[in-house]
Image (cartoon, rainbow, N blue to C red):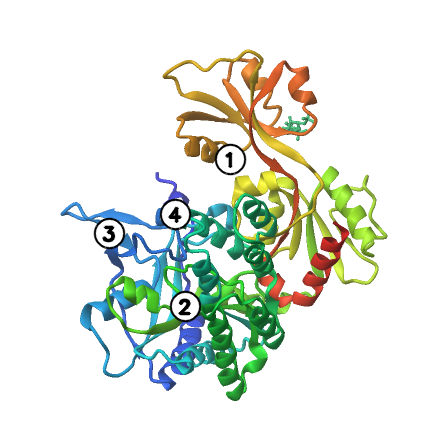
Amino acid sequence: MVKISNFIPEGVEDINSAQYGEIEKMQGIIGDVFKSLKYQQIQTPTFEYYDLFAGIDMAIDKDQMYKIIDTNGKILVLRPDATIPIARMVATNYDVLDEPQKYMYFSNVFRNSDFRAGGKREFIQAGIEYFGDASSSADAEVICTAIQALTACGFNQLKVELGDANFFNGLMDSLEDKIDKETKNDIRILVESKNSPGLASLLKTLAIEEKYKDVLLKLPFLYGPIDQMTDLAESLSLNDMMRESVEDVRHIYRQIEEKGLGQYIYADMGLVNHLDYYSGMIFKIYLQNTGLIVGSGGRYDGLMRKFGKKIPATGFGLNMDVLFEALQSERKQEQILKIALGKGRLAEITLEKLKAIGIHFPDYDKNSRKLIFDDGEGKIRIVFVKAGDVDIYVEKGACDLGVAGKDTLMESNSDVYEMLDLGYGKCRFAIAAMIGFEKTAHKKIRVATKYPNVAKNYYEKKGLPIEIIKINGSVELAPIMGLSDVIVDIVETGTTLKENGLEIIETIEDVSARLIVNRVSLKIKQEAVTTIINALRRQD
Ligand code: PRP
């Protein structure tokens, strides 16, 4: 007899009739809003040529796409995104548009997401695409449509964060001949994840004027009320492109305000996602009661240019699965700020640092087996998790903030903002071997480690083939017992290596404790989160 429970792949699920009813209801409400604004429903094929997506910096990695080999040997992908196929459809059929075209869709999209983060492999995306209108009123209409669709479903606690890709692009334009394309992309990735420590260390290595470095270092913190942030961004602008992008954000905001929806809008001039794709305003949508981003959009004339057409385009997509989750968890919303700490030495130092900024946990006892403690005022809660799990609690929004070692962050590559280098918990990633070790020629190096991804990435960059042996602790034993040639591990004092006859043969990177923040919490619980970030920053 076959074990039937083995026949449902991870990351997908059946939808029962009750759930289907809910889905239909929500799609009906959202669809009515879209249709009332004259968007016409379309559907693109479930699979497309891989080449359509290759070479475009988009929301998902190429290796997250499901690929199929066609009978003629061509690679197809299951639709990983709804916008690109619709842009392909318009670009295939038109050179120019005599009048705007407005489309809406409900499409299943497929992505090979990370199971560690409970990722889904198939979900429904709903959205609109507005072609043929380059004006800011088209952008404002798109954002207003997103707000109206969500409020019609009953989501009133929402925030839309508005930025403009050209603020960053303008800055990069000024640096055109000073840094290469690869470095620009590294900077973009660091700004996108608000990785201020990473950005600071990269900038130290670049021979560019201080004025550029100053603006870049401020980018991760340019979020907040529209007027305040656009004024600040204007004062930081170094050329016309940057100034125009700020004006663009103001202009769009004013039109949204005129429609009575201004209260939902905040600015983030550090929004720089997927710049191959977006070439003007960009926005993201957050709901109070979910730690996940529910939607995003922007102007993507640049994508149309990539397809060889000068057709302006703007639009957004909503993740319907996140919306269903949010609908169900509506009652669970808590205002208390939750901080994830990894049990151990890092937690003890963090508690001292928090105490120094006036945050106490009166019931905390380090010998207790209790895992959750609240401050006296019911405003902040600390949650003790395994050190390697801090980032996952924060990524999924179970906790708003967390303190994690850079070592665990490098290993997991989680989708969180890495906002502060807390300066303690210092150690380094190193490659170590038995004293006198010599690599055998033409043989793969056998690497024992608790950090397989760090080891893989490092050796891949060096172009050296390795065999990874995943060990859960006391890695130093592996070369002694002949299990591996070298180890990749963290070294603090060096005592463990020394006492076991090993030595460092290469240093990979210095690591220390980082303050990480959930992407949605930073915006939804902005005041409380930013107060803590600023207080800890001042402590440096
Ligand atoms: C870490 C690391 C090294 C040791 C380095 O192990 O994996 O073994 O600390 O510290 P040192 O340079 O100060 O000697 P940990 O204590 O976390 O134990 P584990 O290897 O059993 O996980």
**Amino acid type of the residue tagged 1 in the rendering:** Val
Closest to the observer, 23 or 105:
105
* Residue 152 makes an appearance in the image: no
Residue wearing tag 3:
76
Q: What is the CA distance from the residue labelled 2 to the residue labelled 1?
A: 42 Å
Q: What is the CA distance from the residue labelled 3 to the residue labelled 4?
A: 21 Å
Give the SS element for disc 4.
loop
Q: What is the CA distance from the residue labelled 3 to the residue labelled 2?
A: 29 Å
Q: What is the CA distance from the residue labelled 4 to the residue labelled 2?
A: 20 Å
- Of the numbered discs in the image, which one, if any, rests on residue 454? 1
Q: From the viewer's perspective, is the residue at label 4 or at label 1 nearer? A: 1
Residue wearing tag 4:
9
**Percent position (x, y) of residue 128?**
37, 74
**Percent position (x, y) of residue 318?**
44, 68
**Amino acid type of the residue tagged 3 in the rendering:** Leu
Asked whether, in this view, residue 392 is left or right of residue 534, the answer is: left
Kindly check if marks 4 and 1 are in contact, taking CB atoms under 8 A apart as contact.
Answer: no
Q: Residues within 10 Å of mark 1 (few under 14, many from 20)?
A: many
Closest to the observer, 460 or 197:
197
